[in-house]
Image (cartoon, rainbow, N blue to C red):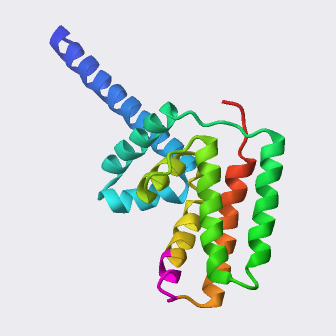
Amino acid sequence: MSTSTLIAIIVIAAVIVIALAIGLWMAARRRRLQNKFGPEYDRTVDAEGGRMAAERELRAREERHDKLDIKELPPERRDRYAGEWSSVQEHFVDRPEGSVQEADELVSRLMRERGYPTDDYRGQLRDLSVEHGRTLEHYRAAHDVKVRSAGHQTTTEELRGAMVHYRALFDDLLTDQRSR
């Protein structure tokens, strides 16, 4: 076997090994993002028009999130928030639309105290998606009902559903207190 044939075989083998390594690395990165973001991964793929654009967006969210100062709440603050949530739920019977508004405000206050920016709804979704991607659909559904309820375009059952959805995110934010 000539030297040039041997070199060609080695080059081809090296290209194949490099391509496999890159493919495995990309697949592992994709799996990590899918596991971390849950249903938000697929939603972002649809919104961005493809996996590569979505993965760039999700990594950018992670980088932005890493710069946030997300804090744990001391037990007494968590207890106070839990008490406030109970109060909001109690008001639902007499004023369902007002309770949904209160639930939204309470979730926003909890987010702000934990260190999440709460300036705009889209930003909230983006920032929450990094650690709370699995409950983000609850927040979207609740927010949609809250917006429609301002125009009195919701049923009591939809308002009750919004409370359930807010509760899912609220519980996630309140109990996700791991060290950073």
- Which quarter of the figure is the N terminus placed in? top left
Q: Is residue 63 magenta?
A: no
Quarter occupied by residue 63:
top left
Question: Residue at coordinates 31% horizontally, 55% vertically from top-left?
Answer: 50
- Which quarter of the figure is the C terminus placed in? top right
Q: Would residue 65 be seen by someone viewing this image from the given angle?
A: yes
Question: Residue at coordinates 58% horizontally, 56% vertically from top-left?
Answer: 108
Image position, residue 51 (x, y; %): 35, 51
Q: Is residue 152 magenta?
A: yes
Question: Residue at coordinates 63% horizontally, 77% vertically from top-left?
Answer: 98
Q: Nearer the viewer, residue 80 or 60?
A: 80
Residue 99 left/right relative to 32: right
Residue 119 left/right relative to 93: left
In the image, residue 135 sits, relative to residue 55, either above or below, namely below
Question: Residue at coordinates 74% horizontally, 85% vertically from top-left?
Answer: 94
Q: How many marks?
A: 0
Residue 152 left/right relative to 179: left
Q: Nearer the viewer, residue 95 or 53?
A: 95
Farthest top residue in view = 3
Image position, residue 22 (x, y; %): 37, 32
Q: Which residues are magenta?
A: 147-153
Quarter occupied by residue 91:
bottom right
Image position, residue 103 (x, y; %): 65, 67
Q: Nearer the viewer, residue 10 or 24?
A: 24
Residue 71 left/right relative to 86: left
In the image, residue 91 sits, relative to residue 169, either above or below, namely below
In the image, residue 150 sits, relative to residue 69, either above or below, namely below
Q: Would residue 134 be seen by someone viewing this image from the given angle?
A: no
Image position, residue 59 (x, y; %): 42, 39
